[in-house]
Image (cartoon, grey):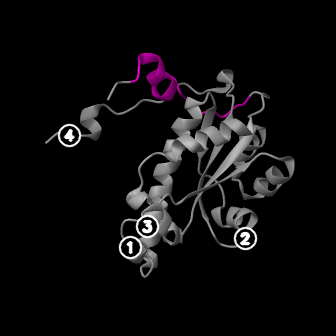
Amino acid sequence: MPRLDTAALDLLFRDARTHNGWSAEPVADADLVAALDLAKMGPTAANSQPLRVVFVKSAEAKARLKPTLSPGNVDKTMAAPVTAIVAYDPKFYDLLPKLFPHTDARSWFAGDPVGAEAVARMNATLQAAYLILALRAVGLDTGPMGGFDAAAADAAFFPEGDAKSVFLINIGHGDAAALFPRSPRLDFAEMAKIV
């Protein structure tokens, strides 16, 4: 496979930052659709695709999200043009006949709610990482974070219980003046070995 050039690697990784401040420039719905269309192409176990996302954009939706936020996350989240509620479908396996049709993968999970929950959470988190990279690829900045009441967010945005929140991603055009200095990263030898 060809490698990405330096500019693409800088965009996705080296120059990309976690933003806490935002410009007033709006985010187009088409960019959110394009990013999710890219993110869904990443691999998941048995092509399970358990990620579910609510892109909170309207004033009414932001008002519902606000009481779920930890105090330190309120201002930056309310200022972000969009906040994605990253969640997973605990019954993702019901779609496996469509998504993984060459075998009965549904039976691997349908009778094991604890195992299914672990698979759903892990793979939705993996897909959310793809989504962060995809948002960067379409020219947006992100600010992923915890610091919210997931049960309250679920009650407000997934009242039927068809998804469970994992974390949030603020999305928009970041204000570089509000960035903290980049924190250190571990060296290869501190986090990995080749055996």
Which dot marks residue 159? Answer: 2
Query: According to the image, label 3 marks what residue?
Result: 118
Q: Position of residue 46 (x, y in %)?
A: 39, 61
Circle nearer the viewer, 2 or 4: 2
Q: Position of residue 181 (x, y in %)?
A: 54, 24
Badge 2 amino acid:
Pro
Measure how far apart labels 3 and 1 are at the Cα level.
Answer: 19 Å
- 177 w.r.t. 44: above or below: above
Query: Is 13 one of the magenta-colored residues?
Result: yes
Query: According to the image, label 4 marks what residue?
Result: 193
Q: Position of residue 59 (x, y in %)?
A: 86, 47
N-terminal of the pair, mark 3 or mark 1, is: 1
Q: Quadrant of residue 37?
A: top right
Label 2 sits on a secondary structure element that is loop
Residue farthest to the right, as pictured: 60
Circle nearer the viewer, 3 or 1: 1
Residue farthest to the left, as pictured: 195
- Relative to the observer, which residue lies in front, 48 or 144? 48
Q: State the extent of the magenta-drawn residues as a range.
A: 4-22
For disc 3, the neighbor class at 10 Å (few under 14, some 14 to 19, many from 20) is few
N-terminal of the pair, mark 4 or mark 1, is: 1
Circle nearer the viewer, 4 or 1: 1
Measure how far apart labels 4 and 1 are at the Cα level.
Answer: 37 Å
Query: According to the image, label 1 marks what residue?
Result: 104
Query: Is 85 one of the magenta-colored residues?
Result: no
